[in-house]
Amino acid sequence: MAVRVRRLRHDSLPSLGGLSEHWPALAAAPRIIVVACGTSHHAGLIGEYLLENLARMPCEVEYASEFRYRNPILCREDVLIAISQSGETADTLAALQLARAAGCLCLGICNTVGSSIARETDGGVYLHAGPEIGVASTKAFSAQLVALTLIALKLGKERETLSPEELSANLGAMLALPDQLRCVLEQKGTVYEMAKVFKYASNFLFLGRGYHYPVALEGALKLKEISYIHAEGYPAAEMKHGPIALIDQFMPVVIIAPTSDPNYRKLVSNIEEVRARGGSVIAITEEDNHELDAQCEYVMRVPSTADFLMPLLCVAPLQLMAYYIADMRQCNVDQPRNLAKSVTVE
């Protein structure tokens, strides 16, 4: 991801050559449909927020496995984006073929050069994240977010929903990401100590709002994939609609609560509600925010950045936490049981 971000300049976007012929169709499309599975689906959900907020572009995100079987309503002006690390995911490939048959412009975001999705799409973006050996996706997820952010910024420019000043400021914020991620990774000692406390937990709950709801889903998925701990991700506002019944002193709750979130005060209320029921709270917030220190067992800190870039920073400590907990439980971190890197069958 650092290589791609380093190619940015404050005054211009990278060309994204695989999409160069398609920007007019993308900018004029009545909607963009994103199809993906697993971690790529979570990236797509963040992409929906990016496209709607930065480019004011209608966007729908679908599980490819559901999309292909539900007889979706498609028009020729729709644009479908298929996201897959391997480029071989069976359900995503089938969803792509369905959209092609309906005459839609089909684009891909994948990491593997020459993969089936890369060959069957009209254009797209290679992630260039390098080989990902572990089954549970980490760096490919981050690279997917970078690619979706660049697409959203380019569409914001094309659709004139971002001023030149806003675009320059956003690109400047992206240029700072590699150094900011290094700062997050330097806190691995804190995450390691926290993992020692919660390594024997049977359940985890992850909560977030807006951009960070999909980050909560991804944090829960990483933990269950490699540590075999049951974990659920929820929109924080939905906690009262069921999950709150599960909260007790044995249920760690991870709440992603950056002050850049417009609903930050509501997230603080979520923390207070968990504490009132005896739950343990792990918070993620900016490094200069100490309001949560007294209310949480642990606080994982990230540098301040634009709200739409915060998922790239917040997901890193969650990936580290899953790794350390799995390692302490003597699980095979790279090859978890029952999982395959590329799901090529239904």
Image: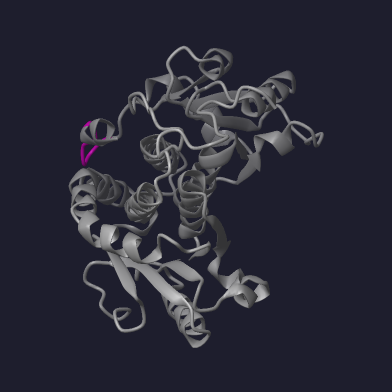
Residue 49 in the image: above or below residue 91: below
Task: Find residue 131 and report its horizontal and vertical position in percent.
Answer: 36, 24
Residue 30 in the image: above or below residue 91: below
Residue 307 placement: quadrant:
bottom left
- 101 sits to left or right of 48: right
Task: Find residue 172 and report its horizontal and vertical position in percent.
Answer: 22, 47
Q: Residue at x 58, y 35 (%)?
A: 338
Q: Is residue 50 visible?
A: no
Task: Tell me the chief SS of the magenta region.
Answer: loop
Q: How many numbered badges does the structure rendering display?
A: 0
Q: Is residue 211 magenta?
A: no
- 57 sits to left or right of 291: right
Task: Find residue 85 and report its horizontal and vertical position in percent.
Answer: 47, 29
Task: Find residue 255 and report its horizontal and vertical position in percent.
Answer: 44, 68
For the residue pair 3 and 168, the one nearer the viewer reads as 3
Q: Is residue 3 visible?
A: yes
